[in-house]
Amino acid sequence: MRVVSIVGARPQFVKLAPVAKAFADAGIDHQIIHTGQHYDVNMSDSFFQELGIPDPDLHLGVGGGSHGVMTGRMLEQLDPVLEEMAPDWVLVYGDTNSTIAGTLSAVKMHLRVAHLEAGLRSFNRRMPEEHNRVLTDHAADLCLAPTRVAMEHLADEGLAARSVLVGDVMTDVCLQVRDSVLANPRPVPGVEAGEDYVMATIHRADNTDDQSRLEHILDALGSLDRKVILPVHPRLRVRAEADGITIARGNLTTIDPLAYPDMVNAVVHASGVVTDSGGLQKEAFLLGTICTTVRTETEWVETVDNGWNVLDPDAGRLAELATRPAPAGDPGHPYGDGHAAREVARVLAEHA
Ligand code: UD1
């Protein structure tokens, strides 16, 4: 069986890591196409190196531009490549422009598509990711869902017959990397040994692209009662430069984007996380660190169920929320047991 994985953005490299390993263990002929959506060394190459992912078989070099331009360029390049590779499955990940481009190219050539992380919904149609994930689920031949809630969304949309619950591959990689960084202590950039701090990330278009909203969020972070470390995502860097905004202020310190193990290490030891990232909300949950999410909703609803994650859409309550005490009680294991990638390999082979 031949599977072609199409990835392009940072969170997809994280998901690819356990999948590539499980495919190698299962003897699957696996090829990797990198669209080039994320191209900075510390947004892309460092993830392949640090997570031991095989080098992509093909790099399309398509990054930047509007959503339509980026997606269109990817489509143009993917058609001949997928035709030549002729895989049994095209595997697409998550909800980015690389996901929808890979899906569209494949289905129009009658290649079968499996969507990993299917069934997530924010129900916020302002988010480009919401369109990407809904359209991908409906075009895919197999929807590989991470959670029961995702399975329910797929069933609600008439997709139950082609949906399978496999668990969450991010759990696989997050728990493995946690064990390795705890066994090999490393410093957190910008933090003195023993110093208390909050980890923050802000990169969603809704938060970065409106100047006064961005200023308000940065002010709120800078006013927290302890150091706040913010690795600056390229979208934030580009927008802040264009608007003449200096990101660092008050207690808010900026650093470059972190490699995955450094981020896991920083979150494990932080007193809280403030973010608008989907993946980081869940990583904080898995790592036992409280999270405050600067969005109106979350796809990862299990994280908010018992107070580990709290939504603060306008960053108006950060002073009170960002360092609140952790909730009591067992948060359970809604994201699986850390063996989802093995299940992905098994399910693809079963349906080949
Ligand atoms: C994309 C995904 C988002 C995901 C995020 C993770 C879509 C629609 N969104 O958003 O779901 O959470 O990745 O990081 O696909 N840039 C660089 N260097 C890079 C990457 C990007 O300079 O390595 C610049 C781009 O040129 C662009 C901006 O950053 O100006 C945004 O990048 P883009 O890939 O469009 O979307 P993200 O905001 O990263």
Image (spheres, rainbow, N blue to C red):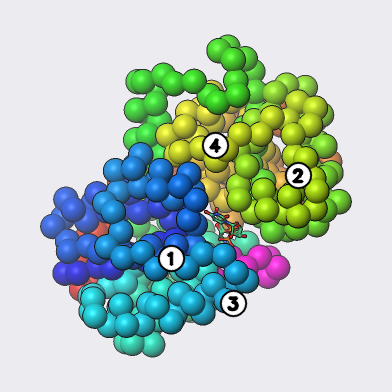
What is the spatial separation of the Cα atoms under label 2 and label 4, in whole angstroms?
16 Å
Residue 240 or residue 3, whichever sits in front: 240
What is the spatial separation of the Cα atoms under label 3 and label 4, in whole angstroms?
32 Å
Residue 296, percent from left and from top? 73, 54
Magenta extent: 123-132
What amino acid type should be assigned to the residue bearing mark 4? Ala
Dot 2 crowding, Cα within 10 Å, few <14, some 14–19, many 20+: many
Q: Secondary structure at mark 2?
A: loop
Q: Which mark is residue 68?
A: 3
Mark 1 or mark 4, earlier in chain: 1
Mark 3 or mark 4, earlier in chain: 3
Q: Secondary structure at mark 3?
A: helix
Closer to the observer: label 1 or label 4? Answer: 1
Q: Residue at x 69, y 30 (%)?
A: 253
Q: Which mark is residue 284?
A: 4
Q: In this figure, what is the number of numbered marks?
A: 4
Closer to the observer: label 3 or label 4? Answer: 3
Query: Going by the image, does 287 lie left or right of 143?
Result: right
Residues marked 2 and 3 touching at CB (< 8 Å): no
Residue beneath disc 2:
312
What is the spatial separation of the Cα atoms under label 1 and label 4, in whole angstroms?
32 Å
Closer to the observer: label 2 or label 3? Answer: 3
Q: Secondary structure at mark 4?
A: helix
**Where is 235 relative to 98, above or below?**
above
